[in-house]
Amino acid sequence: MNEDVFNASLRKFLKKVGITSQREIEKAVRDAVEAGKLKGNEKLPAKMVLTIGGVSLSHEITDEIELG
């Protein structure tokens, strides 16, 4: 295994996940606030599940996203 290639590929994947996830969360929250479904001061439960095929990895992260 080439550690440099692996590390660069992993960082590229995680950057894409982070940027894409942030945009989707921001859009969903703004849309919900505009539609009156949220007041804008809630704490929203959040869960991210990461799966990687070929190595049987399934990793779950749970937390809260505070709006204000």
Image (spheres, rainbow, N blue to C red):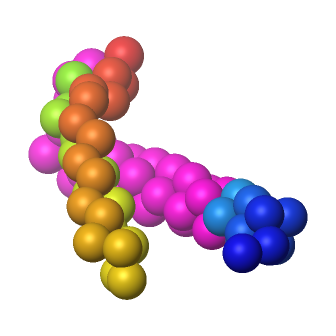
Rendered residue at 46%/49% (across/down): 26
Residue displayed at 33% across by 22% down: 66
Prevalent SS, magenta region: helix
Judge left or right: residue 1 versus residue 64.
right
- Tell me if I can see residue 59 in this picture: yes
Figure quadrant of the N terminus: bottom right
Q: Is residue 19 above or below residue 61?
A: below
Quadrant of the frame with the C terminus: top left
Q: Residue at x 57, y 54 (%)?
A: 18
Q: Residue 60 magenta-drawn?
A: no
Task: Please determine whether, in this image, residue 61 is positioned above or below residue 65.
Answer: below
Question: Which segment did they paint magenta?
Answer: 13-42
Q: Position of residue 2 (x, y in %)?
A: 80, 73
Residue at left 52%, top 51%? 22
Residue 54 horizontal/vertical position (percent): 37, 83
Residue 63 to residue 23: above or below: above
